[in-house]
Each structure stands twice: as C-alpha cells, then as structure tokens.
Image (cartoon, rainbow, N blue to C red):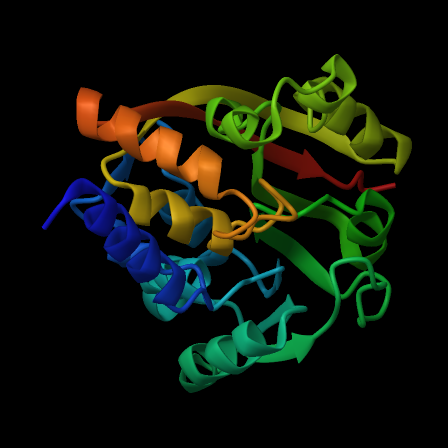
Amino acid sequence: MDEKRSFESLVAEGAAVPTDGWDFSWFEGRATEARPSWGYARAAGERLARAGAALDIQTGGGEVLDVSLGVAGANRPGLIAATEGWPPNVAKATELLRPRGVVVIAAGENDPLPFADGAFDLVLSRHPVAPHWGEIARVLRPGGTYFAQHVGPSSVFELVEHFLGPLPQEVRAGRHPERERAGAEAAGLEVADLRAERLRMEFHDIAAVVHFLRKVVWMVPDFGVERYDKELRTLHERIEREGRFVSHSARQLFDVRKPER
C-alpha cells in the first residue's frame, strides 16, 4: 500500500468510528493521554459514598459516573440524577445508568438545571463545556459540594493551532482556573481546593487525530476531513516521520462548597 492510500485509509477509518459517549477505548494503541494525579472517577466515587442526593452534570454517555458508582458501592446516595444535552448520549447514558437507579434527564448545556433549589448535597461534573455557577449554587443545599474536573486553558492547543493557526491570547487564556474561581465566588460559593495540571498526549496515527477532533467537537469547531485535507496530510507526514504527534491537555480539579448560611 503506498503512502497516499495509507493516508486515505486511515482518515476514512477515523471518520467512520461512532462518536457517542465518552468511552475512549478505541484510542488504545493509537493515542495516549497522561491522567491527573488526583484520580477523578475514584475521588468522585468516594464523595458519592458520603452523599444523600447527587447530580452529575453533562454526564456524556454516563461512563465516568458509572465507574464512580462502582467505587461508592453499596454506600451510594438514595437519589442520583444526571443531565445530558446531546440526544445520542442521552440514550446511551439512560441505557447504562438506569439499571443503577440513576434518573437521566435531557437538558442542554446552556439550559437551567431542571431541579428545585437545594435539591442536592453533591453535584459532580467531568469536563463540562462551561460551569454555570449560578445554577450549581442554586441546586446545592447549604453545606453541599460541587466536585468536578474541568478542562483548563490552552488544552491540546498544539493540535488545535496546527489546524487553526496561532490563536489570540484571550482565546488561549479561556478556562483559566482563576477566572473560574472568580465565577464560583461571584455565585456565593467557596473554593476549598483548586488544582491544575498539564499532561502529555500522543497521537500515533492520523486516524486517531480525525476521531479525536470529531469526538471533541469544540477543539476545531468547523472540522471536516475535506475542509482540512491539507493540514491532515501535513500532520500525517509528520507522524510517519517522527512516530507521534505530541500535545498537552490541561485539567483542573474544583472542590467547591456552598456556605451553610
């Protein structure tokens, strides 16, 4: 197989893989990402084991919440709900989480949370598009906790800027942890702990790049294999030459409390 056909075959493969849910097992052997030191799914499970009523915001296909519930075991909350906005993920999360007693509700990422004030003593979220601090504060009970892993600033921007070119500083600074801290505090919440890490990612073939950009759609919002054929070919040649393309993700952990009064 010549190099051109190899490129076309890999791109076609990456373009054909389903993108619903947050199961990243397809990337095994094709891409790697270092994990944050705090172990979010396990830590969230330990929080669930101490909660009475919990909510997972933007749950995706429910995969991370499912792992956390496994950590909590029999000490799980009596009430657990999850929200998700993308219809394929709503269906997938319902199928996965309903047997665990989780109520999955369709709600867009920009919609008000469809719950009463003070309904939960624990709110979780892994990689929300944006934290809606006012709504999080509203649905938390006094003394309740928001425990979440957010995407940090300039995450995977080595890859993003390969396709979009250099981005302005205000874009690179988006999702900055101190800005998000300020947003939480403006909503009347207290940030008990905030940690941030940058983590190495490696893409070992162009199929992994194509699937990643189709799955994480906000990275290159107008991504398409025909639109970015030139950039994909250049990147394919670099991976063939160097064996990998290295980028870095940004992750930050928020442990936030609603004051008792």
Nearer the observer, 142 or 251: 251
Residue lying at 32% horizontally and 64% vertically, measured from the top left: 70
The image position of residue 76, as x and y in percent, is 44, 67
Q: Can you tell which quarter of the image residue 54 is in?
A: bottom right
Residue lying at 61% horizontally and 22% vertically, measured from the top left: 165
**Which quadrant of the figure contains the C terminus?**
top right
Q: Is residue 36 above or below residue 121?
A: above
Q: Is residue 240 above or below residue 229?
A: above
Q: Residue furthest top?
A: 169
Residue lying at 57% horizontally and 35% vertically, measured from the top left: 151
* Residue 38 seen in render: no
Q: Can you tell which quarter of the image residue 63 is in?
A: bottom left
Q: Is residue 66 above or below residue 96?
A: above
Q: Is residue 76 left or right of residue 184?
A: left
Nearer the observer, 17 or 58: 17
* Residue 80 seen in render: yes
Residue lying at 83% horizontally and 53% vertically, measured from the top left: 135
The image position of residue 142, as x and y in percent, is 79, 49
Q: Is residue 193 left or right of residue 237?
A: right
